[in-house]
Each structure stands twice: as C-alpha cells, then as structure tokens.
Image: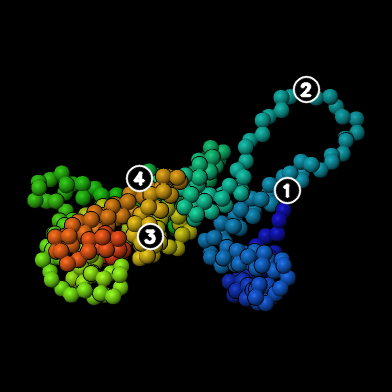
Amino acid sequence: MKPTYYHILGIREDAADRDIRNAYRKLVLEYHPDRNKDPKASERFIEIREAYEMLIEPEKRKGYDQVLRMMRAKAMQEAVKSAPKTKPPEPRPAPAKTKPTPKPVVDPQDLMRMTQLLQKGKIADAEAVARKVISIDSKQPTPYAVLGDVHRFRGELKKAAEMYAYAAQFSPGNSIYQRKHEEVLAAMRTDSMVTTVRTGTPDTVGIGFVVGMIVIVVAAAYLALSQERPLFPGFAPLSTWTLGLFMSLLVSGVGMGAGLALSGQLDGFLVVHGSAVSKISPASLLGLMSAICYWAAAGLYFVVGVVQGTFNLSLSRALAAAGGITVFLTLASWVNGRIEPFQVFLVGGNVVYMGILAGWMVGEAFRE
C-alpha cells in the first residue's frame, strides 16, 4: 500500500488543522525546487502539496479517511485469506458443499476517482464510474451525489433531486447532500412558477426577460444613431470604438443576463458546476476566457461539450445570448456608418458576456 497523505506530511491521522499547516510549511521550505536541487525534490514537493490540499479541507479529509478505512479493511481481508491455515488433527469428513460466489466489493479507488473526474469536468466518465459503483453497492451515498451533480449540470433538475435524496438517505449526517437537495427543489419550484406564467395570457410573459429585450433594442437604436468620437483612434483593434458602443454592449449584456435569471432560464450562478468540490464555476471560468476572446471561449465550450458530453443548459443559454446580442449590435454599428462592424463583432462579445454574468448575479439576487 502506497504512503498515505498523513505519512507524506509526517503527521498523525488525528492531527489538528494547525498541525497540518505547520507540517506543510516546514516540508515546503525543505523541498521547494528553488531551494532544494535534488532531482526528486520537485516530485516530493508535488506530493506534499496534494496531501495538504486533501487534508486541510474538512469534507475532502472526511472522504479520504473513509477511503483509507475501506482500503485497510480490504487489505486485512486479503491478508486473512492468504494466511496459512493449520491442518486440524484427524479432520472429520464433511459433506460436499457448493462454494458460494463471492459478493463483488466496491473498489475504494473508484470512489475517489469519481470526484477527481468531476473536478476535471469529465462528466460522462464520472457518470459511468458512479453507475458502476451503484451496480455493485446500491447503498453507497457518494455515487448518488455525483449523479446528482451530473444531472444538475445538464439542467435535469428532477433527476438531480432524486439522486441527492438517495445520497442524503444513505448518509443522513451529511449536510452537503441535504443542502444540494433543497437547492434543486427550490430551483424546480422557480421553474414551475415560470412555466405557469408562460402558459397564461400573452400579458403575463416573464417581465424580466421582456425588460432585457427592451434594453437591447434601445441600446441598438442609440448605437445606430450616435455620432460620438472614437476613444482609441490610434489602437487598430478598437480604433472606431466609442463610449456609447462600450456602454451599449455592457448594458445589453446586463439586461439580458438579469432577464434570463429572473425568468428562471438560468440556474444559480455560484452552483452551475456539477461538482461539490469545485471552487470556481464554469460560468466564471468562461468569463475569464471571454475577457480575452469570447468567440474562442464559446468555441472551446462547444468542442469540450461534444467530446466529453458536458453541455450545461444555463451556460449554453448565456453564451448563445451573448453571441446573438453581439451580432445584433454589430448590425447596429453597420447602420451607424462610423463604427467598423468587424471590430464590434470580433471584440464585442467579450463585453457582452461579462455583462451577462453581472446581470445573472443581479437577477438571481432579485429572484431569491
């Protein structure tokens, strides 16, 4: 059995958080590649950092301790089976019995691998491992929680709620499973209210979404008629950009993001990820990429979604809305005549998507 994270840090398994931090600081100073020129120091440094990141987080440490106990129990069972047995003196003949088929046992490595795959965004692979574990032991809570994250990421709220309910049932003391179940139920109630509004009269369409559309139309009209001076005439990529153009893109994004959130078209901003251990949502990650190039971020999202089956309904709607607004305001800049449409098309999505993220958070706050 390979060294545990506790062995790597040189601490006891009941060590307090303070002991973990002290051991980590001491070992980092000793094995940091800038201070230690030993060829193996870099590999040792990575192991120390992985051990610290696993043990310093209470929920991660709790799961890791559970896996350790299972692995040790499995090793003990194998040791007992392989131990030589003393032959009893003068054994009595016994009737022949059919040897029972051994019951499959869940591999502890699979439990850890599910979370790691989910962290890396490999949704389909994480789902496959979770279903494999459930087929072996249907009372394991972790795979149900993973499936709940997978279904929620895909916008399948009803299935997500069912999986979280199973996870909470098989692990009653886990507050995270219960909280996730309640979050999904709240999202389902919001969707139900929005559906009721949509099936009513035309005057009862979601006000938030209508206001967002009005903001975009007004911004496009202003952009088409404005005669402002460029802000960066000497900077080729933005040589014809004006303050009005920037504000039109930003305000349109904010209006649409808030409208989609208020009308229940977007899930919670901070929980659109699919992994209980992820500290940054894909919406935020795509926002960072879009600040550099929206079209590249959207293309990467599409390719990864096709290859790994990681499409998320809320993110898809937000990205599609950003592209549509960008194209619409590009046409408005063409009508203006003084603003280069290609510049708006190429860079405008960066501003629009950032605005959508801001509006998303604002709309979610009002919805709650």
Q: Earlier in the sequence, mark 1 or mark 2?
A: 1
Q: Alpha-carbon distance for marks 1 and 2?
A: 30 Å
Q: Dot 4 surroundings within 10 Å: few (below 14), some, or many (20 or more)?
A: some
Q: Secondary structure at mark 3?
A: helix
Label 4: which secondary element = loop
N-terminal of the pair, mark 3 or mark 2, is: 2
| Gap between marks 2 and 4 measured at Cα | 56 Å
Relative image position of residue 322 (x, y in whole percent): 27, 57
Q: Residue at x 38, y 57 (%)?
A: 297
Label ID, residue 95: 2
* Alpha-carbon span between mark 1 and mark 4: 41 Å
Where residue 28 sits, quadrant-wise, is bottom right
Image height of 204 relative to 243, above or below: above
Q: Quick one: SS at disc 2?
A: loop
Q: Which residue is mark 3?
A: 286
Q: CA distance from mark 3 to mark 1?
A: 47 Å
Mark 4 or mark 3: whose residue is earlier in sequence: 4
Q: Which residue lies at the image location 70% right of the left edge and 59% below the top edge?
A: 3
Q: Amino acid at mark 3?
A: Leu
Q: Earlier in the sequence, mark 2 or mark 4?
A: 2
Q: Depth check: 327 or 14 in front?
A: 327
Q: Where does label 4 land, which residue?
A: 156
Going by the numbered disc 1, the residue's amino acid type is Met
Instruction: Report the label total.
Output: 4
Q: Can the viewer see residue 337?
A: yes
Q: Nearer the viewer, mark 3 or mark 1?
A: 3
- The residues bearing labels 4 and 3 have C-alpha atoms spaced at a distance of 21 Å
Task: Give the alpha-carbon distance from disc 3 to disc 2, as whole Å.
Answer: 68 Å
What is the number of the mark on residue 104? none
Write the residue at 71% across / 56% down.
2
Kind of residue at disc 4: Glu
